[in-house]
C-alpha cells in the first residue's frame, strides 16, 4: 500500500548504468550564418538607437522624463472636449472622410481587379506582362499613402481631390497585392476545364478564375475601405482634406482638448465600421 | 431504330422537361445598387472641385518628368542618410512594440488567461490599432521635441495594438497536445507556457514582427512630414518648394530601399516559419530500423 | 498500488464517462485497458494523474488521493506519473532534448526551467531516458524531423525522464503502422519489466492487448465489464467487451489474428 516514491528513479539510473554507455551527441554549434545574422542585427540595433549622427538617440530616461514632465497634449487629454464632435466643422470633416474613402476604394478596387488577375503567374498573359505588372505594383505599394497625398497636393492643389487620388493609388496597391496572392492558391480544375473547352485566356480568367477569387476580392476591398478610412485621418496633415485637416488645425492652434475629442470620435467611427465590415467579410468567406 | 428517330425522341423529351426559371438574385441587385449609389452619391456630394481632375494626369506626368530629368547625384548621400533614419525609426519602433506586445498577447489569449483579462487587454490593444502613427507622432512631438525619438515612440505605440492582437491569435491557435503533456509532467502554468506554448508560437510571432517592420518602414518614411524624423521631411520640403530633382532622388531611394527590405525580410520570414533543416540532413523513415 | 473506489466521472453536459469503477492495480503490473472509443478508457487513465478529476468516488495513487490534492501536490503527483499520448504531443519545433527535459519541469526550480538553465545533471537524466529507448543520437534534432515511431519513443523518454512510478499510455500506437506499433509496445514492456514501473496502456487492438498485457481490463459505457489475465482474454471476452462481433478493424494484423 504505502509505496515509496523515490525508488524507481534509482532503478532507472542503475538500469542505465548497467548498459554500455552510448556516445552522447555533441550539442551542435549555431551555424555561422545564424551567428553572423544575430551579430549584424545587434549592430544595426545599436547603431540605430545610439545618440550619434546616424542614430535616433533612443534613451529610456529621456522617454520617462518626457512623459512625466507636464505637457500640452497630455493636459489636453485630461480636459478632453467631446462637445467639438457636435460642431459643424467636425461633422463636415467626418462626412468628407467617409466620402473620400468610399469614392477612392470603389474606383481603386475596380482598377485593381484586372491588375490582380494579371499579377499572378496563372493569370498573366505572358512572362513580360507578368514582370511589368509586378514591378508596377511593387513601386505603387512602396509609396506610402501620405507621400501620394504630397505629390497630388503639389499637382492639383489642396482639398479632397488630391486626398482621393492618393487613396485611389494606395487602394490599387493593396487590393491588387492581396487578391493576386489568393489567385496562386485557387483550384486549377476549372482552369483546366476552361482551357480544354477551347476558351481564350481572357475567357478562362472570366469563367474559371474570377468566380473563385470574387469572395476574397470583395473581402479585401472592404478591408481596404477600413484602411482608407484610417488613412484619411492623416491626409489632412498635408492639405489633402478629410477629418485630418480638422485635427491638424486644432493641433496647430494648440487646442489639444479638441484634438482628442475629434480623435476619440474618429476612433469610434473606425471601430464601428471595422465591426460591420468584419461581420460582412466573415459571411463572404 | 434509325438515327433520326433517336433524335426526335430526344428532342421530344427535352421539350417536355420543365425548365427552372432563372431565380432573381436580390442580393446581387442590392449590392450593385449600394456600390454604384454609394460611389455616385459620395463622388457628387464631396467638395472636391472635380474640374481639376482632368489636369491631374498631365500634372503628375509633368512632375514625374521633372523629378527624373533633374536628378542630381549630389543629393544621394543626403537621401540615403535620411532613409537610414527612417529605417532606424521603423526598426526600433518595431522592437518597442515587440517588447510591449509580447506579455499583452498572453493576457489577451483565451487559452491562457481568464475572461476579464482577455476582454480588457483586447480593448486596450484595439485603441492603438485604430489610431494612425501620424497622430501619435504629432501628440509626442510636444513631449519629446521635433526629431526621430518622437517618431520611434509613435511607431512603437501604434504597432503594439496590431502585433499584440495577432500574437494573441497565434497563441490561441497553438496545439493543445504539448500543453497537456507539460501538465501531465507536473509543469506549473508558467512552465507550460514557457516550454509548451512559446516554442510552438515563437516562429510565427517573430515572422509577424518582421512583417510589421516592413509596414513600419512605409509609415516612418512619411513621419517627417510632421517633423518626427526620417526622410519624410526631405520629401515634404522639396515637394513643397518644387525642388523636383531632389524630391525625385528621395522618392527613388524610398521606393528602392522599401522594395529591397521587403524582399530580404520576406525571405527571412519564410525561412523562420519553415524552420531549419535537420542537421543530419535526412529523416529515418524505415520502421524496421527502430526495432 | 493504484486504487479506484466507485470512481465516477460526469462531464459537464451530463455524459457519464466513468461509472462506479472499482479497481486495484498492484505495483509493477502491465495493464491494458480495452474498449470501444467512448467507453471511458482515456478518462480512466486521466483520472490517475488528475488531468480529469473524478466527480464521484475516489482514486488513490499510493497513499495520495487524486481528488484531494492542492495544486502544488497535484503537480508533484503528476511528476511521479509519466504519460504517453496518441499524437505524441511533442513540441515539433524544438529539439528532442528540450522535449525530454519537459519531463523534469517539476524537479527543477521554476526560475531555472524558465531560463532554460537545466544544468548538466538534468541533461544527463534526459540523455539516460533517451538511451532506454535507444534514440540518444537524435538528441539535438528537431522533433519535427523524426518519423512517427521515433517521435513516440521521444514521448516515452519524456515520461521516463520524470523517473515515474506509474506510466500511463493513451492509445500509444493508434497513429503508427504495425511494425512500429510492435516496437513501441516492446519498449513499454521493457520499461515495465526492467524498471518495474506500473504501466497502464489504452489499446483498441485485441491482439496487441493479448500479446503484451499481464492483465486486461475491459470497459464498456464507463463500466468495468472484464478484468482478468491477458491469456484469458479470448475472442469471446472481447466480443463481450465490445458488445458486438469482432471485425478486421479490431486487430492490428488482421490475417494473423483471426
Image: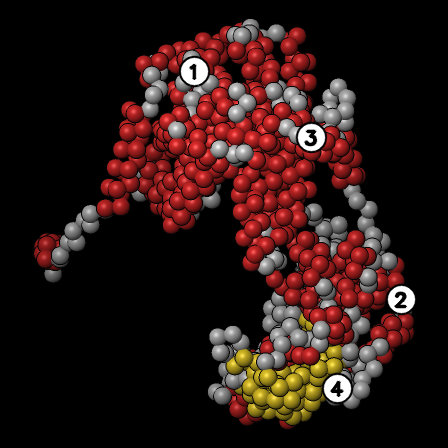
Q: Nearer the viewer, mark 1 or mark 2?
A: 1
Q: Nearer the viewer, mark 3 or mark 4?
A: 3
Residue B143 in sight from this viewpoint: yes
Q: Which residue appears at 52% of the width and 89% of the height?
A: C239
Q: Nearer the viewer, residue C116 or C239?
A: C116
Residue B40: where, in percent of width, then height?
A: 28, 28
Q: Which residue is mark 3?
A: A69
Q: Which residue appears at 53% of the width and 43% of the height?
A: B126
Which quarter of the figure is the N terminus of chain B placed in? bottom left
In 3D space, how far apart are the residues under numbered discs 4 and 2 (Cα atoms)? 32 Å
Do marks 3 and 4 share a subunit?
A: no
Q: In the figure, B139 relative to C12: above or below?
A: above
Q: Nearer the viewer, mark 4 or mark 2?
A: 4
Q: Chain of mark 3?
A: A
Q: Which residue appears at 49% of the width and 26% of the height?
A: A247
Classify 10 Å Cα crowding around label 3: few (below 14), some (14-19), many (20 and above). few
Q: Nearer the viewer, mark 3 or mark 1?
A: 3
Q: Which residue is mark 4?
A: C1
Disc 1, SS: loop
Mark 3 and 2 residues: CB-CB less than 8 Å, in contact? no
Residue A21, numbered label: 2
Residue A172: where, in percent of width, then height?
A: 43, 29
In 3D space, how far apart are the residues under numbered discs 3 and 4 (Cα atoms)? 67 Å
Q: Which residue appears at 32% of the width and 14% of the height?
A: B51
Classify 10 Å Cα crowding around label 2: few (below 14), some (14-19), many (20 and above). few
Mark 1 and 2 residues: CB-CB less than 8 Å, in contact? no
Residue A158, numbered label: 1
Disc 4, SS: loop
Amino acid at each position: 500500500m504505502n509505496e515509496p516514491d523515490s525508488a524507481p528513479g534509482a532503478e532507472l539510473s542503475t538500469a542505465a548504468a548497467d548498459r554500455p554507455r552510448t556516445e552522447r551527441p555533441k550539442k551542435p554549434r549555431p551555424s555561422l550564418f545564424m551567428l553572423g545574422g544575430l551579430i549584424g542585427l545587434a549592430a544595426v540595433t545599436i547603431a540605430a538607437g545610439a545618440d550619434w549622427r546616424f542614430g535616433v538617440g533612443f534613451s529610456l530616461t529621456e522617454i520617462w522624463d518626457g512623459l512625466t514632465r507636464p505637457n500640452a497634449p497630455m493636459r489636453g487629454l485630461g480636459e478632453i472636449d467631446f462637445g467639438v464632435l457636435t460642431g459643424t466643422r467636425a461633422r463636415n470633416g467626418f462626412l468628407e472622410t467617409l466620402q473620400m474613402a468610399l469614392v477612392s476604394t470603389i474606383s481603386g478596387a475596380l482598377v485593381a481587379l484586372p491588375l490582380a488577375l494579371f499579377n499572378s503567374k496563372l493569370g498573366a498573359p505572358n512572362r513580360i506582362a507578368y514582370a511589368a505588372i509586378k514591378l508596377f505594383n511593387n513601386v505603387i505599394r512602396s509609396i506610402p499613402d501620405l507621400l501620394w497625398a504630397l505629390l497630388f497636393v503639389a499637382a492639383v492643389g489642396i482639398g479632397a481631390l488630391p486626398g482621393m487620388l492618393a487613396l485611389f493609388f494606395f487602394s490599387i496597391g493593396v487590393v491588387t497585392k492581396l487578391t493576386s496572392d489568393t489567385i496562386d492558391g485557387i483550384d486549377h480544375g476549372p482552369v483546366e476545364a476552361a482551357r480544354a473547352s477551347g476558351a481564350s485566356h481572357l475567357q478562362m480568367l472570366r469563367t474559371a478564375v474570377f468566380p473563385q477569387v470574387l469572395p476574397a476580392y470583395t473581402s479585401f476591398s472592404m478591408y481596404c475601405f477600413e484602411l482608407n478610412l484610417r488613412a484619411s485621418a492623416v491626409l489632412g496633415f498635408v492639405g489633402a482634406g478629410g477629418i485630418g485637416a480638422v485635427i491638424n488645425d486644432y493641433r496647430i492652434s494648440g487646442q489639444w482638448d479638441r484634438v482628442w475629442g475629434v480623435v476619440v470620435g474618429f476612433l469610434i467611427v473606425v471601430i464601428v465600421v471595422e465591426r460591420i465590415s468584419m461581420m460582412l467579410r466573415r459571411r463572404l468567406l | 431504330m434509325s438515327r433520326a428517330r433517336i433524335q426526335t425522341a430526344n428532342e421530344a423529351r427535352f421539350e417536355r422537361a420543365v425548365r427552372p426559371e432563372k431565380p432573381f438574385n436580390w442580393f446581387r441587385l442590392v449590392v450593385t445598387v449600394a456600390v454604384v449609389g454609394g460611389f455616385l452619391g459620395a463622388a457628387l456630394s464631396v467638395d472636391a472641385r472635380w474640374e481639376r481632375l482632368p489636369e491631374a494626369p498631365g500634372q503628375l506626368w509633368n512632375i514625374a518628368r521633372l523629378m527624373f530629368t533633374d536628378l542630381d547625384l549630389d543629393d544621394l548621400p543626403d537621401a540615403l542618410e535620411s532613409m537610414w533614419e527612417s529605417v532606424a525609426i521603423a526598426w526600433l519602433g518595431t522592437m518597442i512594440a515587440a517588447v510591449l506586445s509580447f506579455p499583452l498577447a498572453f493576457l489577451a489569449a483565451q487559452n491562457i488567461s481568464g475572461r476579464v483579462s482577455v476582454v480588457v487587454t483586447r480593448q486596450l490593444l484595439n485603441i492603438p490599432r485604430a489610431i494612425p502613427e501620424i497622430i501619435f507622432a504629432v501628440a509626442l512631438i510636444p513631449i519629446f521635441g521635433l526629431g526621430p525619438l518622437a517618431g520611434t515612440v509613435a511607431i512603437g505605440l501604434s504597432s503594439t495594438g496590431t502585433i499584440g492582437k495577432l500574437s494573441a491569435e497565434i497563441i490561441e491557435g497553438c496545439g493543445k497536445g504539448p500543453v497537456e503533456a507539460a501538465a501531465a509532467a507536473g509543469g506549473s502554468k508558467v512552465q507550460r507556457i514557457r516550454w509548451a506554448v512559446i516554442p510552438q508560437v515563437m516562429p510565427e510571432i517573430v515572422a509577424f514582427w518582421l512583417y510589421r517592420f516592413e509596414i513600419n518602414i512605409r509609415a516612418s518614411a512619411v513621419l517627417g512630414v510632421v517633423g518626427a524624423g526620417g526622410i519624410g521631411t526631405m520629401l515634404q520640403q522639396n515637394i513643397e518648394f518644387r525642388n523636383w530633382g531632389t524630391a525625385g532622388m528621395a522618392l527613388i531611394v524610398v521606393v528602392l530601399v522599401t522594395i529591397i527590405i521587403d524582399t530580404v525580410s520576406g525571405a527571412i520570414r519564410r525561412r523562420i516559419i519553415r524552420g531549419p533543416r535537420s542537421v543530419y540532413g535526412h529523416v529515418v523513415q524505415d520502421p524496421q530500423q527502430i526495432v | 498500488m493504484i486504487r479506484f473506489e466507485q470512481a465516477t466521472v460526469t462531464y459537464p453536459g451530463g455524459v457519464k464517462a466513468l461509472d462506479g469503477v472499482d479497481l486495484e492495480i498492484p505495483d509493477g503490473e502491465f495493464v491494458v485497458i480495452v474498449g470501444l472509443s467512448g467507453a471511458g478508457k482515456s478518462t480512466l487513465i486521466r483520472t490517475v494523474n488528475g488531468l480529469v478529476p473524478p466527480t464521484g468516488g475516489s482514486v488513490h495513487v499510493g497513499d495520495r488521493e487524486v481528488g484531494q490534492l492542492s495544486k502544488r501536490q497535484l503537480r508533484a503527483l503528476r511528476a511521479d506519473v509519466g504519460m504517453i499520448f496518441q499524437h505524441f504531443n511533442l513540441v515539433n519545433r524544438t529539439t528532442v532534448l528540450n522535449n525530454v527535459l519537459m519531463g523534469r519541469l517539476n524537479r527543477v526550480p521554476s526560475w531555472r526551467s524558465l531560463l532554460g538553465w537545466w544544468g548538466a545533471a538534468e541533461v544527463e537524466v534526459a540523455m539516460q531516458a533517451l538511451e532506454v529507448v535507444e534514440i540518444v543520437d537524435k538528441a539535438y534534432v528537431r522533433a519535427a524531423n523524426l518519423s512517427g515511431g521515433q517521435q513516440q519513443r521521444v514521448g516515452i523518454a519524456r515520461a521516463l525522464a520524470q523517473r515515474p512510478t506509474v506510466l500511463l499510455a493513451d492509445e500509444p500506437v493508434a497513429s503508427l503502422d504495425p511494425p512500429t506499433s510492435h516496437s513501441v509496445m516492446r519498449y513499454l514492456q521493457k520499461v515495465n519489466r526492467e524498471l518495474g514501473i506500473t504501466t497502464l496502456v489504452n489499446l483498441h487492438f485485441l491482439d496487441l492487448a493479448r500479446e503484451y498485457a499481464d492483465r486486461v481490463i475491459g470497459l464498456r459505457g464507463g463500466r468495468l465489464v472484464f478484468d482478468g489475465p491477458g491469456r484469458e482474454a479470448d475472442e469471446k471476452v472481447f466480443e463481450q467487451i465490445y458488445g458486438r462481433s469482432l471485425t478486421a478493424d479490431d486487430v492490428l494484423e488482421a490475417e494473423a489474428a483471426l
